[in-house]
Image (tube, rainbow, N blue to C red):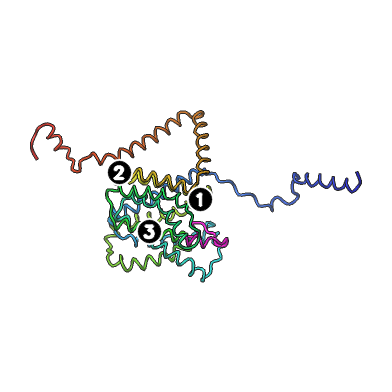
Amino acid sequence: MTTKDGERASGEVLARNSEHVLPLSNPGLVKPLPPPSTLHPALYVIAWITLSSTVILFNKWILDTAKFHFPILLTTWHLGFATLMTQILARTTTLLDDRKTVKMTGRIYLRAILPIGIFFSLSLICGNLTYLYLSVAFIQMLKATTPVAVIVASWAMGLSRPNFQTLFNVSFIVLGVVLASFGEIEFVLIGFLFQVGGIIFEAIRLVLVQRLLSGAEYKMNPLVSLYYFAPICAIINGIVSLIFEVPKLHAADIWNVGVWTLLVNAMLAFALNVSAVFLIGKTSSLVLTLCGVLKDILLVAASMLIWGTRVMPLQMIGYSVALGGLIYYKLGADKMREYRDRMRRLWDESGRARLVLRKLLVLAATTVILLLTLGALAPRYLPQQYDAKQYLRSALGKKGP
């Protein structure tokens, strides 16, 4: 070996060894790595599902049960509160630091943010008006068609090319919702039209957002999006409410609901947006989609328990078909097989390690399915006018009022 070869070989050895040598710089000047999150991702999932379900049920209660028939004004209140909170968070925390990477100018705001804000406002207005006419269960069933509307809107606006395979994949969602609609007992046409309008406006908004975010400089998380969209949406909703709702509003309408109730409602709606940021950050957008499916199922069950909503068997079948089509569209056949195999392995492992827990899960799932089935079938056999005293008198052969 020559001297040059020896120097090169020794240099390679030193280069390899230098990877394991401690740095000679001052450790105090080196930034420590941020501590890992101590919260399990499941907690973020539970928080988002809980907040999302609570906000929907809370809005239904305020608009329907509490007789606060001012859905546009309620939406304006939510957006005004969100505007105030995002401004405060932007100045006091780091949650909105991502906004500094967005190259927002007045021209972009007028050409991109304003149209999105208009369709966002229309979507919120129609969505809240629907609560005055339809049950929460039926609303969630209709919302399952949102991906179909997004696909059609993206084709119509030239963002993507028509694909018949994709159309076939989402056709099961449409079929399921059609079955659920035919099975709806308390079908109100105006409420149905409001929900369809809300879905269409939401689909156009999502396509516009997708077009805006196609550039890397406009990437925004849900909280940053709210920072930009909430002010313009609050103004638009405020103008519409001044025309249609404020002239009919009385102080008694607000006091009947309660100022504190409205404040808590707005806080929960804003907390939902914050939880979505953490959920996506700690998991993924796919997890958010699957959590949405689970949330919709829980809302249907909650609507049956809280308001006594009658869900017919045809609706349950249709909604199951729609949810199955939604999951298939979001995941695809390959991903579904992968997750199925993974769940099967986890199920087998849990059966060997925690047999009691596995039996409890099976029992709980069976109980929930049984209760939902009985709740759907019960109205078919229960008389419309059921008087327990009259029934006992008839059974005993007695007469009287």
Up-down: is 117 above or below 7? Answer: below
The percent coordinates of residue 155 (x first, y second) are: 47, 60
Q: What SS does tag 1 mark?
A: helix
Marks counted in the figure total 3
Which residue occupies the extreme right position in the image?
2
Direction left: furthest residue: 399
Type of amino acid under label 1: Ser
* Nearer the observer, 242 or 290: 290
| SS of the residue under disc 2 | loop
Residue designated by label 1: 285
Is residue 87 among what the camera can see? no
Disc 2 marks which residue? 312
Q: Quadrant of the N terminus?
A: top right
Amino acid type at circle 3 is Gly
Q: CA distance from mark 1 to mark 2?
A: 32 Å
The region drawn magenta spans 207-226
Q: Which mark is residue 198?
A: 3
Name the mark on residue 386.
none
- Which residue shows up at 34% across the image and 47% down it? 179
Report the quarter where the C terminus lies. top left
Quadrant of residue 62 within the rendered picture = bottom left
In this rendering, would 359 be left or right of 178? right
Identify residue type, mark 2. Answer: Met
User: Badges 1 and 3: C-beta atoms under 8 Å apart?
Assistant: no
Report the residue that reaches farthest toward the bottom.
107
Q: Secondary structure at mark 3?
A: helix
Q: Position of residue 12 (x, y in %)?
A: 81, 46
